[in-house]
Image (cartoon, rainbow, N blue to C red):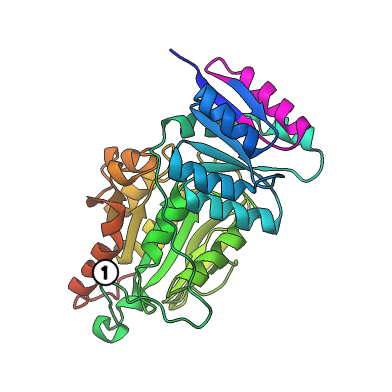
Amino acid sequence: MPKTRVVVVDDSALVRSILTEIINKQTDMECVGAAADPLIAREMIRNLNPDVITLDVEMPRMDGLDFLSRLMRLRPMPVVMVSTLTERGAEVTLKALELGAIDFVAKPKIGVADGMRQLAQDITDKIRIAAKAQIRRAHAAPAPAPGAPAAPAPAPVSIASLGRMSTEKIIFIGASTGGTEATKDVLVNLPADCPAVVITQHMPPGFTRSYAARLDGLCRIRVKEAEDGERILPGHGYIAPGGFHLSVERSGANYVARVQDGDPINRHKPSVEALFLSAAKIVGPNAIGIMLTGMGADGAKAMKVMKDAGAYNYVQDEASCVVFGMPREAINAGAADEVLPLSQIAGRVLDRLRATSGISLNRV
């Protein structure tokens, strides 16, 4: 079997050396070139035809985002971003994912050499995933200007038409690789008065707050990083903080968020499994589950538990996934009620909310 050919692009000679060492220790991949800046990288890509690129976010001579934008327009290929764990690094990384990067690795600000070697499995796993991922030609829509009116939702639903629907129902979303953009595509099509949305996206600490803020600026609903004990309200989205599990609990007549430390579940923290099990136990038939693109099987079994508890579940189809891992496992587990292209999921959720608004929702 041919090895995955990787080109490393980073302005740090130390990082280039460490990434080359990590990649070349694997039996299924090799570093065929290492470039100090995008202009050198451009020639390497042309001459070496790699399968995957690792790309530093901030570099001299040409900004990493500018290079990525040109690359995805002219020669789309799998890219894993290597980001600095800072607020600016998080914002730039999210923009890179929007432009079509498959995933990212956060390099430490201090102790870079030891820190990168500790991330060796994460780095090589993401290169393997990227090599098999479906490449998106991204046409990123700009964020609306402050004060500018939002575009109308394709299928608006109002609380007036749903009665108690929006306070009783909760939408649960699980996602991993490719999920930052997939989740955004669902959320931007939800009206301001839709039921609460609770989201676990596999993402490390330091990135989820920026991600929530970015979504908040794009969506009609308010989006924030979840806080332990806060009430879950209609018209709001809650993102699991990186490094913590998110679940829901009942407090009297209200749902509340539970943000807790703990061991990784299915190698993830936050874990979709933790969120979906709480949805089954606490929300039951008033839960709507959505499984989006991602590698592995996190949340698949729990989504079947949700279905058995009366939830209605939507799973993203293979053609629209960056990685058809978690959705495939959910389908194989018998958890899916509908398997849909990403572009149809929000509309079908709203259709179902309208269609079921006349039923009694007092069950807990």
Foreground of the two, 337 or 302 = 337
Residue 299 within the magenta-colored segment of the rendering: no
**Left or right side of 291 for 215:** right
Q: Is residue 17 magenta?
A: yes
Most foreground residue, 6 or 126: 6
Residue 328 appears in the figure: yes
**Outermost residue to the top:** 1
The answer to whether residue 310 is seen in the rendering is no
Say which of 100 and 210 sits in front: 100
Q: Is residue 295 left or right of residue 61?
A: left
Return the x and y of residue 165 as percentages of the image width and height: 30, 77
| Front one among 344 and 60 | 60
Residue 209 place in picture, x, y as percent: 61, 62
Q: Residue furthest bottom?
A: 160
Give the quadrant of the N terminus. Answer: top left
Q: Which residues are magenta?
A: 8-30
| Crowdedness near tag 1: few (<14), some (14–19) or many (≥20) residues, C-alpha within 10 Å | many
Residue occupying image coordinates x 35% and y 74%: 168
Q: Which image quarter: residue 235?
A: bottom left
- In this view, 85 is above or below 159: above
Amino acid at circle 1? Leu
Q: Secondary structure at mark 1?
A: helix
Say which residue appears at 59% left-offset and 18% top-offset: 26
Q: Quadrant of residue 23?
A: top right
Q: Residue at x 33, y 63 (%)?
A: 287
Picture residue at 63% right of the left edge, 37% below the top:
39
Report the number of numbered marks. 1
For label 1, the residue is: 350
| Image position of 83 (left or right of 50) | right
Which image quadrant for residue 35? top right
